[in-house]
Amino acid sequence: MTKVTGRRQAREWAVQFLFQTEFNPDNLDRALAEFWNDEEKKPVERDRKYVDEVVRGVIEKQREIDRTISKSAQNWDVDRLGVLDRVVMRVAVYEMLFRNDIPPIVSINEAVEIAKAYISKESGRFVNGVLDRIQKELDRPSRTQNLQ
């Protein structure tokens, strides 16, 4: 796998952290501190801030995010989804609903690429289908920032 940098790497870190918390819920501040102590992680401040914001946001808004996913994941309850599929979609849906500085199409494309890289091509197609249905329900343009 090629080395990724910037926002893609930050999204992957957010997915990794949230995946961890699915199995080992812990004190969030302590878990984040331990996560960043890994010698292989050398984020620039902007990316670390993004990861921390996304992780906290996904955890805080998880019920709303999961309801949104469930409505669009036809015949799939969020709890029945694979853990990685669920976490990848939670990050994307969080961005789509609560991060107006990120165009929804970017969140979808990034989630699909992460799903294909870490899960499978089929998972990428599934994630794309669910997120595309969610995006169509949004009250914002898919390809531009909404800086209101």
Image (tube, helix red, strand yellow):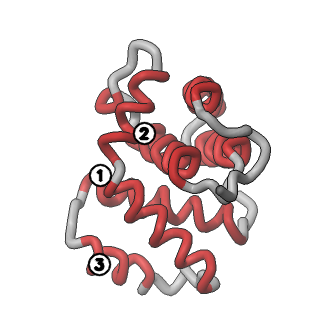
The residue mark sitting in front, 1 or 3, is 3
Q: Which residue occupies 62% across, 80% down? A: 46
Residue 83 versus residue 70 in the image, above or below: below
**Residue 12: quarter of image:** bottom right
Q: Percent from the top left, x then y, of residue 79?
A: 29, 32
> How far separated are the C-alphas under marks 1 and 3?
16 Å
Please name the amino acid that badge 1 sits on: Glu
Structural crowding at the residue carrying mark 3, measured as other residues with C-alpha within 10 Å and reported as few (<14), some (14–19) or many (≥20): few
Q: Which residue is farthest top? A: 75
Residue 79 versus residue 97 in the image, above or below: above
Residue 86 image label? 2
Q: Percent from the top left, x then y, of residue 138?
A: 59, 33
Q: Which residue occupies 40% across, 54% down? A: 58
Structural crowding at the residue carrying mark 1, measured as other residues with C-alpha within 10 Å and reported as few (<14), some (14–19) or many (≥20): few
Observer-nearest of 4 and 104: 104
Compared across the picture, whether 53 is left or right of 128 comes to left
Residue 22 image label? 1
Structural crowding at the residue carrying mark 2, measured as other residues with C-alpha within 10 Å and reported as few (<14), some (14–19) or many (≥20): some
Mark 3 lies on residue: 29
Instruction: Look at the numbered discs 1 and 2 and tell me whether their residues touch, using CB distance below 8 Å.
Output: yes
Instruction: Look at the numbered discs 1 and 3 and tell me whether their residues touch, using CB distance below 8 Å.
Output: no
> How far separated are the C-alphas under marks 1 and 2?
10 Å
Compared across the picture, whether 108 is left or right of 69 comes to right
Q: Earlier in the sequence, mark 1 or mark 3?
A: 1
Q: Earlier in the sequence, mark 1 or mark 2?
A: 1
Visible residue check, residue 69: yes
The residue mark sitting in front, 2 or 3, is 3
| Secondary element at tag 2 | helix
Q: Percent from the top left, x then y, of residue 96?
A: 58, 45
**Residue 67: quarter of image:** top left
Q: Which residue is farthest right? A: 143
Residue 50 versus residue 39 in the image, above or below: above
